[in-house]
Amino acid sequence: MLHEDFLGPWGLLIIIVIGVGIILIALLLFVCFLMPGCIGYEYFRKQRKEVKSVPLQTKNQEKNLKLNDISYRSWRLGSLYENDSNGIISENAESQRNSFNSTTQYKNMDCSSTLNLIYPDKQKNDKKMKEFPIELTMSLQYLPPCDNIIPGKLVIGIEALCGLPPKQYNGTLEPYVVLNIMKQSWSYKKRQKLHSFRTRMIKHTASPIYKETFVIANIKPQEAKEWILDITAYDHDRYANHTELCSLKVLLKNMKKIFYSPEIHMFNYKMKPSYQEFGHILLAVSYLPTAERLTINIMKLRDIKFISTGLSLNEFNPYVKVLMLNGKTGKKMKKKKTKYLCTIAQPEFNETLTFNLAVTQLDTVQFLVVLCGKVLPEGLSANTVDASDSEDSVSSFKKSTDIFIGKMALGKGVRGSTERLHWFSVLQNPRKLVTVWHTLK
């Protein structure tokens, strides 16, 4: 037989012994994994505990964070701290991860109904956000006088802009350019506008083409060389104050060649992005998923600046207006506002505005918070305006004037990193007030 040829006369016995040995080893291993105290049994017990503990944690988190089946559940927390087209988070990633983990610990403990997400001392400016290369194309031409009959003319052309930064909230830009001419010899405080021009507004573009020219007559070269061209680009906002996008100052004394040849000279400049701030506002936001209600508590303001409004403290009667916008179309859906306060430098409202908001709208809706000032005519008190002011009152429109001072936006698709983190934390912590200081721009 085959085993006798290879193993000799003992071949059959050897094969039987090997088979019995394999069966005994398999039985010993099987018994070792079943009996407590054995190495195999303890090893598999640890593996089962680790596998079971992970799904339990994720299930508990889903129960705590569940607001039906909306898409924010698929958001990655790390994406808020990474570079993207909308900007980056203003704080360090590690510190904010630790702070966010601490907030979830408070949530699991249920020790408080409020949540302070970002402290003002740790909050940094969004100036480190991605800067967009903004370029201005401008033309200059000087036509010298002729025989004391035709005076000299300076022709300034605003040709085009390229690479404007996006809007704070979802919506298209509506940019326009303001050109102010001043003398360089004047001090900054006493500097007045000799001439002021403004281009038309172009909608739905970040690279507008204007091709507009402005002519200044009766100009001598010696006078024009002392001028400064102050060029500023703004974004028209139908709901709040116009946003300053970028600015540029051009000294005509450095443009001597335009006074020696009457040709049209083209120039390309890189404009400096603007980071205007008009103060800070403290907001406490919470969402109730069962009642489908969002509450925004307007708490207080500080460091209010009246840069472009020309108001003084005696004329400042502040109130806050909150607009609920459709994030896709940018149209206004609802509007609510607080009461007026009389001439207070750092007003405290402590007023709650409530909005009915379905869970399915959380991904698309955005809220625009606008700080406004009521300018009252002489002899009219704020109490009188507050009692009679409404959208349907014609008399109230004639009695007072509203001035927009600053704004900020809340929502999933807003540009500011602090604003997006605040909104994300409200959704992750239902039934809790999430309190954050925001910068008005």
Image (tube, helix red, strand yellow):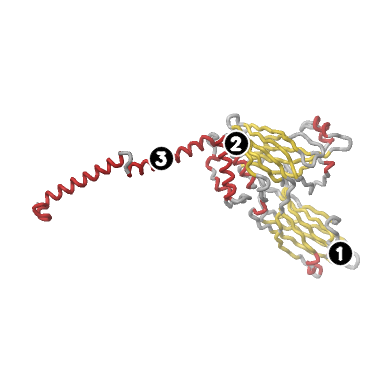
**Marks 2 and 1, Cα distance to the nearest angstrom?**
59 Å
Helix, strand or loop at mark 1: helix
**Mark 2 or 1, closer to the camera:** 2
User: Mark 1 is on which residue type?
Assistant: Glu
* Residue type, mark 3 in image: Lys
Picture quadrant of residue 76? top right
Residue located 58% across and 52% down the image? 83
Task: Tell me: 405 left or right of 380.
Answer: left
For label 3, the residue is: 49
Residue on which disc 1 sits = 223
Query: In front: mark 2 or mark 3?
Result: 3
Residue occupying the point 84% across, 64% down:
226
Number of labels in the image equals 3
The residue located at (85%, 59%) in the rendering is: 187
**Res 314 → quadrant:** top right
Identify which amino acid the numbered label 2 is placed on: Gln
Closest to the camera, between mark 1 and mark 3, is 3
Q: What element carries label 2?
A: helix
Label 1 to label 3: alpha-carbon separation: 85 Å
Query: Please, is residue 272 above or below residue 263 in the view?
Result: above
Is 92 placed above or below 422 here? Answer: below
Q: Neighbour class for label 2 at 10 Å: few (<14), some, many (≥20)? A: few
Kindly identify which residue carries mark 2. Answer: 361
The numbered mark at residue 15 is none
Tell me where residue 52 appears, x and y as whole percent.
42, 39
Crowd around label 3: few <14 · some 14–19 · many ≥20 (10 Å):
few
**Upstream in the sequence, badge 1 or badge 3?**
3
Left or right of residue 334: residue 63: left
173 with respect to 145 (left or right): left
Residue 209: where, in percent of width, then height? 70, 55
Task: Classify residue 31 as left or right of residue 426.
Answer: left
Q: Viewer-proximal residue, 191 or 305?
A: 305
